[in-house]
Amino acid sequence: MVVPFGQAICSVLTREVDLILLDCGFEAGFGLQLLQDFKSRFPGIPVIFVTAQSSEDIVTRAFKSGARDYFQKPLPVFAVRDLIMKLIGAKRKTAEPRDISNAGQQNQTAQGHLCQIGRFQPAVMKVVCYIESNFSKMISLEDMAGLANMSKFHFSRLFNREVGMSPVRYLKYVRIQRAKDLLKRADLSVFAVALKVGFEDVSNFNKNFKNFEGCTPSQFRSRLHLSPHSTGSELGEI
């Protein structure tokens, strides 16, 4: 459904909305204000921010204001469509019974999607799902232990025993797994990817990415570009 800016808030208030595609055209400043309003009122609804303008400042402000993704016009139609289907599909999965085979479980674990397995103790499960849904936000060990209603020491010990790594490391791991997918997009710089997955500066992003993957984000992107399965439309210069 398409509605003008002036009716956007009322439209969401009166309907069940799965996703918002916020197209602000050349009015990036107004669009950012509306984005902040959306996220303050409806934090659980993902917002895709679209604008005809482009600058590092707009990208930074959009992600910090809570945008799930950012696109500049003209839109990469297929990429936008795929993202929308992915977000809606993920929302539907959370409402369905989870029945994952061992092979499927291993794949989900490797990609940082443990919330879809649901085989941990409830306190750990709650934090795992929170991390996977909010990895782009600032999340401290204190925040995670608070969600589990446990002390930091006992929570860290339980989480490490259940998941196989510390909660802080799992947060970083999820961010890096999401970053690997985003690095395939030609319209996102390494800096934009870093912001989108929760790192506030490229240096910290590079350090953590190399720690998990053995190479920098730029090197990872270059390897994808050289892959025979990659195309020029999927990747580009940083």
Image (cartoon, helix red, strand yellow):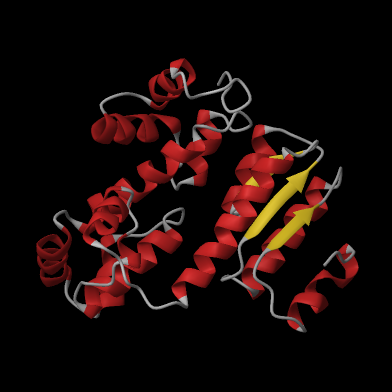
Percent position (x, y) of residue 199? Answer: 43, 43
* Residue 4 horizontal side relative to residue 91, left or right: right
Q: Is residue 127 visible?
A: yes
Residue ID at (21%, 60%)? 102
Residue 3 is drawn in which quadrant?
bottom right
Residue 19 is drawn in which quadrant?
bottom right
Front one among 150 and 164: 164
Q: Can residue 66 be seen in this view?
A: no
Front one among 231 and 122: 231
Percent position (x, y) of residue 111? Answer: 33, 48
Percent position (x, y) of residue 78? Answer: 69, 42
Percent position (x, y) of residue 95? Answer: 47, 78
* Residue 83 horizontal side relative to residue 31, left or right: left
Give above or below for 79 relative to 152: above
* Residue 24 horizontal side relative to residue 237, left or right: right
Residue 218 is drawn in which quadrant?
top left
Give above or below for 172 relative to 189: below
The quarter of the image holding the C terminus is top right
Q: How many numbered tags mark residues here?
A: 0
Residue ID at (31%, 47%)? 172
The quarter of the image holding the N terminus is bottom right
Residue ID at (46%, 53%)? 136
Q: Residue furthest bottom?
A: 14
Front one among 147 and 129: 129
* Residue 117 horizontal side relative to residue 92, left or right: left
Front one among 16 and 216: 16
Residue ID at (77%, 84%)? 14
